[in-house]
């Protein structure tokens, strides 16, 4: 065997080689995606799941939600520079494994839009690393929105100063590097090119469907970052899609995104042949004791023709089941959801505080809604400002009524139906079974789309995209509509007024091309109503 001296020499060399490999590995890890080995566990532990989907985080100041009625002068309204993100945001950026699962599920990326959730996080991470010397030098300083610490800047090279002072969010397509979008061969952002970190088309292509957050194995909260950057663009930079101006104005002045008169909220009531109780008509100050549910109709449910069919169907089903309910009529106003998703947090707060004050004053406790966006806002976001209510989606309540035999649909074989999971009903609020169980109660032959359940593909209306023109790539609603049509089902069932609009438009477009003959889009409630009206034929 080897001598003791030789063994000692081999062990010493092996030890130093082992230490050297570990040190080299640490250097490689700190400058590569493998940094997630250390940051991912921290990110998972500090994530806000199960709440990363559903409610957006409020704008914070000094550890508390910002008071919009009296905001401090140095408050940050969103994120417009890498220095304005929090330490938790930085951990989010560094935790990315670059696996691409978020990108694979993203409706924007899958319809040829420039938004990739993976590349968005990588851009923010790469900019964080490129700006690290400044961030360390400026640590502890208190700055307003868009401000940079001059003393910290003075310690940097001219190239580093230029990087920090260029627009954080802007138009990438007006540059000579548009064809590569500023990426190097290895997929990382080349910050030597004079490009904004985040492109406008990247930021505004998001539907906030939550597929990225749902798929991320390390709990990165992509939607929160996009919302924060939109807030900065709307409330500070005033740089956002022009179509949103109309929506903002309509919500602020008319109380709904369509700009309809408040009195028209009652129009559907005159179209049913039974009495609808409207709050305040008999001089009530609070919800009467015999009322089981306040029916929150929503803007779409009151004004949009297809959504009004759902509103009337739900009202008739509740009436048939003997449920005592009441509506607010022209006293209802927008929840503020479209404004919040578009980045206008101030307008959202104005709408939300008005609604919470009103609902608390009339002592509303149990609310039923037909719109998943209203559901998410009333149930998940209003508690942030003191509005705690028991809110259910109409499919949940109708399923309960069927289970207790208060509704008795005639179950008989019918044409095939495929169900589209709305993002804000499914992924954001985990309501998957009630709509399907109602379809089963009607005897429908269900055909599931490949992308269903928590992997459902967005209709394209979320994230305030309902009020923006879709100018890049394939339209999201047509992508989803084609998938539904391909199942061969004659009925596409939905449980959201926005999904109804988008998929109806997609089907109509294909029918004009000679396809999808006989295919219709219907809310689950209207299908249930048809089943309860059927007569048993002996």
Image (cartoon, helix red, strand yellow):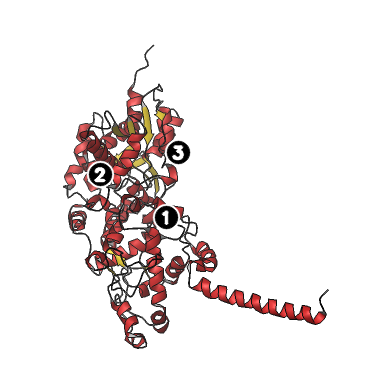
Badge 1 or badge 2: first in the primary sequence = 1
Q: Which residue does the image show at 27% across and 53% down from the upper left?
A: 464
Q: Is residue 77 above or below residue 359?
A: below
Foreground residue among 355 and 454: 454
Q: Is residue 463 above or below residue 1?
A: above
Foreground residue among 423 and 93: 93
State how far apart marks 1 and 2 are (Cα). Answer: 30 Å
Find residue 194 and report its horizontal and vertical position in percent: 28, 73
The mark lying in front, picked from 1 and 3, is 1
- Crowdedness of circle 2 by 10 Å Cα count: few (<14), some, many (20+)? many
Disc 1 marks which residue? 102
Disc 2 marks which residue? 300
State how far apart marks 3 and 2 are (Cα). Answer: 24 Å
Find residue 409 and report its horizontal and vertical position in percent: 39, 25
State how far apart marks 1 and 3 are (Cα). Answer: 24 Å
- Crowdedness of circle 1 by 10 Å Cα count: few (<14), some, many (20+)? many
Disc 3 marks which residue? 433
Report which quarter residue 354 is drawn in: bottom left
Q: Secondary structure at mark 1?
A: helix
- Left or right of residue 40: residue 419: left
Q: Secondary structure at mark 2?
A: helix
Q: Is residue 155 above or below residue 522?
A: below
Badge 3 or badge 2: first in the primary sequence = 2
């Amino acid at each position: 065997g080897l001598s003791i001296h030789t063994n000692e020499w081999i062990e010493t060399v092996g030890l130093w080689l082992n230490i050297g490999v570990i040190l080299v590995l640490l250097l490689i890890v700190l400058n590569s995606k493998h940094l997630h080995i250390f940051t991912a566990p921290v990110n998972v532990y500090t994530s806000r799941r199960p709440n990363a989907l559903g409610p957006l985080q409020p704008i914070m100041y000094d550890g508390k939600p910002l008071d919009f009625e009296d905001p401090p002068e140095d408050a940050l309204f969103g994120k417009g520079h890498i220095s304005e993100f929090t330490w938790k945001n930085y951990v989010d950026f560094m935790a990315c494994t670059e696996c691409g699962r978020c990108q694979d599920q993203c409706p924007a990326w899958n319809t040829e839009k420039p938004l990739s959730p993976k590349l968005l996080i990588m851009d923010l991470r790469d900019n964080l690393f490129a700006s690290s010397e400044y961030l360390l030098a400026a640590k502890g300083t208190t700055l307003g929105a868009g401000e940079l610490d001059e003393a910290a800047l003075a310690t940097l090279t001219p190239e580093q100063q230029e990087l920090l002072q260029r627009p954080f969010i802007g138009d990438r397509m007006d540059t000579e590097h548009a064809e590569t979008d500023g990426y190097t061969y290895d997929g990382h952002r080349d910050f030597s090119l004079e490009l904004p970190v985040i492109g406008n088309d990247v930021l505004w292509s998001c539907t906030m469907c939550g597929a990225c957050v749902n798929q991320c194995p390390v709990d990165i909260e992509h939607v929160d970052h996009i919302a924060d950057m939109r807030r900065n663009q709307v409330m500070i930079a005033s740089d956002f899609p022009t179509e949103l101006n109309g929506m903002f104005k309509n919500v602020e002045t008319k109380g709904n995104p369509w700009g309809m008169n408040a009195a028209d909220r009652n129009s559907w009531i005159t179209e049913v042949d039974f009495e609808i109780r409207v709050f305040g008509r008999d001089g009530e100050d609070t919800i009467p004791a015999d009322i089981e549910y306040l029916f929150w109709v929503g803007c779409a449910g009151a004004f949009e023709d297809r959504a009004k069919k759902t509103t009337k169907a739900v009202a008739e089903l509740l009436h048939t089941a003997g449920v005592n309910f009441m509506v607010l009529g022209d006293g209802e106003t927008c929840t503020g959801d479209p404004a919040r998703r578009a980045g206008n947090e101030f307008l959202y707060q104005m709408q939300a505080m008005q609604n919470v004050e009103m609902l608390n004053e009339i002592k509303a406790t149990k609310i039923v809604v037909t719109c998943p966006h209203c559901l998410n806002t009333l149930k998940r976001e209003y508690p942030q400002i003191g509005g705690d209510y028991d809110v259910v989606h109409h499919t949940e309540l109708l399923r309960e009524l069927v289970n207790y035999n208060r509704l008795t649909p005639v179950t008989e074989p019918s044409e095939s139906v495929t169900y589209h999971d709305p993002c804000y009903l499914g992924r954001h609020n985990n309501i998957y079974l009630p709509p399907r169980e109602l379809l089963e109660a009607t005897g429908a032959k269900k055909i599931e789309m490949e992308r269903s359940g928590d992997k459902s593909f967005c209709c394209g209306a979320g994230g305030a995209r309902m009020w923006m023109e879709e100018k890049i790539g394939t339209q999201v609603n047509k992508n989803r509509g084609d998938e539904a049509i391909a199942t061969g089902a004659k009925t596409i069932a939905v449980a959201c007024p926005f999904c109804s609009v988008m998929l109806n438009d997609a089907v109509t477009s294909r029918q004009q091309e000679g396809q999808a003959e006989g295919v219709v889009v219907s809310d689950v409630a209207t299908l249930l109503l048809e089943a309860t009206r059927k007569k048993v034929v002996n």
